[in-house]
Image (spheres, grey):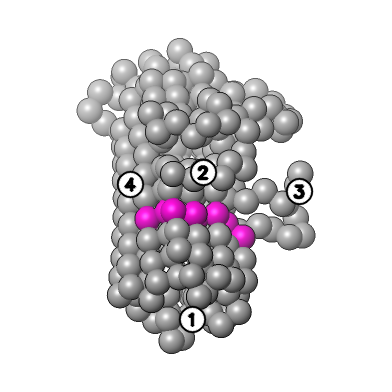
Amino acid sequence: MRMRLAFPACLALLFAAPLGAAELSADDVRRRIAAAGERPPELAGRDLSELDLSGLDFRRARLARANLFGTKLVGANLAEADLSGANLDAAWLMRANFDGADLSHASLFAPVIYSTVEARRAEAPSFAGADLSGARVIARLAGVNLRGAKLANARLGVDLRNQPMGQMRNDFSGADLSGADLSGADANRAVFAFANLANARLVGADLSYADLSGAELAGADLSGADLTGADLAGANFKGAKGLETAKGLAEARNRDRAQF
């Protein structure tokens, strides 16, 4: 499988840490989780930046608006946690479980997904069924499980005016986005090479200049999507809906090499 790597694992080190220190120590967080018992741990709005919280069980935890900048969450279980509006910029997310988590309007700018420049499947976090609606994501998510995730109105594209450090692109190469909802998402210039977007909802999505080469789009709904300049080489659109209303299809690159 071809992988296009845009984010070296050390990229997070280029960011300056936010001012101030974490409100709680890692031991404080462990004690709170233990004291919560069967109840969801309450950590909403807390500054947990740069703590090592690897391997902790945050299932159903309330972490809305929490500051997790640079926090190590390697192997942590955040399934069904409330992370709405949380800051996960430069956080270490290898093997973390975000299945069913609420990450709506969260920020995931350059999180560390893999420990090396190689996208190792064994290190990939999982976001199956997670809600990333309205989230700002710029990450190397090659091979990541996003099956059934909600990315409606998510900001996944290149910010041509305000993105620091040049134009970094989301890399979804080989990711599983089957059944995901990307309606209204801005995914301009994102890399979806060989990604599984079967039955995904892409209504009104901005896919301009995106790399869709080799992507599986069977049964996807592309009504009103913008495909201007997108690379469609080897992409499978068989059974896709709404192509007659998609914008820029005639101007897409390698359209003649796609399957319709």
Q: Disc 1, disc 3: CB below 8 Å?
A: no
| Mark 2 vs 3, N-terminal side | 2
Label 4 SS: loop
Q: Is residue 234 visible?
A: yes
Nearer the N terminus, badge 4 or badge 2? 2
Instruction: State the residue position of label 3.
Output: 166
Residue 152 percent coordinates (x, y): 44, 63
The amino acid type, in three-letter code, at marker 4 is Ala
Mark closer to the observer (4, 3): 3
Which secondary structure type mostly characterizes the magenta part of the structure? loop
The numbered disc on residue 128 is: 4
Mark 4 → mark 2, Cα distance in angstroms: 21 Å
Q: Identify the disc placed on residue 109.
A: none
For residue 3, the mark is 2
In percent of the image, x 49 and y 55: which residue is there? 192
Q: Nearer the viewer, mark 2 or mark 3?
A: 2
Image quadrant where residue 161 sits = bottom right
> Which is more N-terminal, label 1 or label 2?
2
The picture places residue 14, in percent across and down from the top left corner, at 72, 31
